[in-house]
Amino acid sequence: MQTCYIFSAAEGLPQKLEIKKEDLIIAADLGFENAKKSGVKPDVVLGDFDSLGYEPENIEIIKHPVRKDDTDTLLAIKVGLGRGYKKFVIYGGTGGRLDHTIANIQSLAFLAENNAFGILKGDKYCVTAIKNRSVSFSEKAKGNVSVFAFEKASGVNISGLLYEIQNAELSPYFPLGVSNEFIGNKSEISVKNGTLIINYDGDEETASIK
């Protein structure tokens, strides 16, 4: 699947990145510097450029006013959606300011709401969101995985992990799904109605959406 890669300004940069011709790379404001650190040249740089302080040359620029409703990362997501992309990987979107990290997690839910799939790459972990669908993990996955209800979620199934559930209901007011574990099995998390936020150890290739 073709992928839209977004570089934001904080932590969680790729160790290595294989870009295909059909992929799209967007840098959100100061994320341009993170893209350069990763040896990647963006196709698009956007934002209000208050953090970066200048507009890069010889690259498509999409400039926005400082006073706006969307974060720079969400603006990048909307550009990717507008160009037909359904899979997104966001680097540099965790750590730093907590409010920015929370905003980026909400942006994952925005992608799920729009029938797309996003992965937010942290330093040693990833976060994703699913709505009315499932995500699977290979038997090579290791470490912890936690499942949180972004809204009231029903028909939740977790299989192949240390703790399994069937046809359960999760509430955003109680963190029942925290600190599950990969145990060397193929595993799957699904939800029939609602949106789940899933935090897991590993890299962006660990999870596969269905």
Image: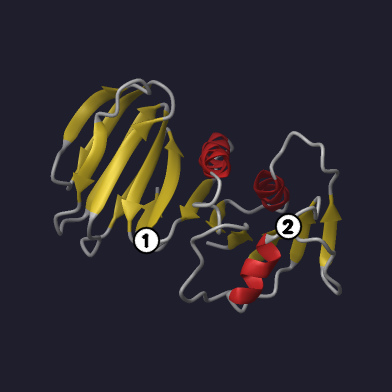
| Mark 1: amino acid | Lys
Q: Is residue 22 visible?
A: no
- The image quarter containing residue 46 is bottom right
Secondary-structure class at tag 2: loop
Q: Say which residue label 2 marks.
A: 29
- At a point 61% along the width and 79% down the height, the residue shown is 39
- At a point 81% along the width and 50% down the height, the residue shown is 48
- Which of 96 and 29 lies nearest the eye of the viewer? 96
Q: Residue furthest bottom?
A: 39
Crowding around mark 1 (Cα neighbors within 10 Å: few <14, some 14 to 19, many 20+) is few
Above/below status of 43 relative to 190: below
| Mark 2: amino acid | Asp
> Residue 194 location, x and y as percent?
42, 26
Q: Say which residue label 1 marks.
A: 124
> Residue 142 location, x and y as percent?
22, 60
- Which of 64 and 54 lies nearest the eye of the viewer? 54
Q: Is residue 73 left or right of residue 17?
A: right
- Which of 203 and 95 lies nearest the eye of the viewer? 95
- At a point 82% along the width and 43% down the height, the residue shown is 66
**How far, Cα to Cα, is label 1 from label 2?**
24 Å
Q: Is residue 144 left or right of residue 74?
A: left
Above/below status of 2 relative to 94: below
